[in-house]
Amino acid sequence: MSSANKNNYKVKLSRKASTYLSRVNSPFDQRIINALRLLAINPKNDSQDIIPLEGRAGEYRLRVGKYRCLG
């Protein structure tokens, strides 16, 4: 993530993740997109299930339902 401006961050998706989200049409699609938007606004949001990844400094896991977003 990089700073987009003072208040928001930029969330980048891998090509594979972007393709997956554009093809899959399920109720989780919008939940994942909304969770990533919230993450861009406030990456330290306590209401989201975010934990650091073991053995990978500076990388985190965001859980959205049964899906995990890694970065």
Image (tube, rainbow, N blue to C red):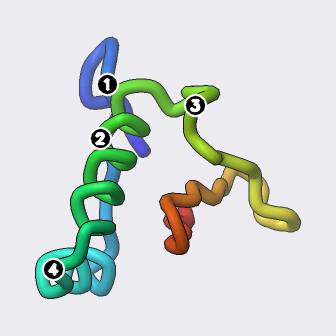
Residue 37: assigned label: 2
Circle 4 crowding by C-alpha within 10 Å: few under 14, some 14–19, many from 20: few
Identify the residue at image location x=56%, y=39%. Answer: 48
Q: How many marks?
A: 4
Q: Is residue 19 above or below residue 60?
A: below
Looking at the rendered image, the disc whose residue lies closer to the viewer, 2 or 3, is 3
Q: Nearer the viewer, residue 1 or 46?
A: 46
Q: Quick one: SS at disc 3? A: loop
Circle 1 crowding by C-alpha within 10 Å: few under 14, some 14–19, many from 20: some
Drawn side of residue 43 relative to residue 5, left or right: right
Name the residue carrying label 3: 47
Check whether the beta carbons of the residues at disc 3 and disc 4 lie within 8 A of each other: no
As drawn, which residue projects farthest toward the right?
A: 55
Name the residue carrying label 1: 8
Check whether the beta carbons of the residues at disc 1 and disc 2 lie within 8 A of each other: no
Name the amino acid, label 3: Ser
Q: Is residue 61 above or below residue 2?
A: below
Name the amino acid, label 1: Asn
If the image is split into quadrants, where does the C terminus sit? bottom right
Q: Quadrant of residue 3?
A: top left
Q: Quick one: SS at disc 4? A: loop
Identify the residue at image location x=65%, y=46%. Answer: 50
Q: Is residue 62 above or below residue 47?
A: below
Earlier residue among tags 1 and 2: 1
Q: Quick one: SS at disc 1? A: loop
Looking at the rendered image, the disc whose residue lies closer to the viewer, 1 or 2, is 2
Identify the residue at image location x=23%, y=76%. Answer: 26
Name the residue carrying label 4: 25
Q: Is residue 52 above or below residue 13?
A: above
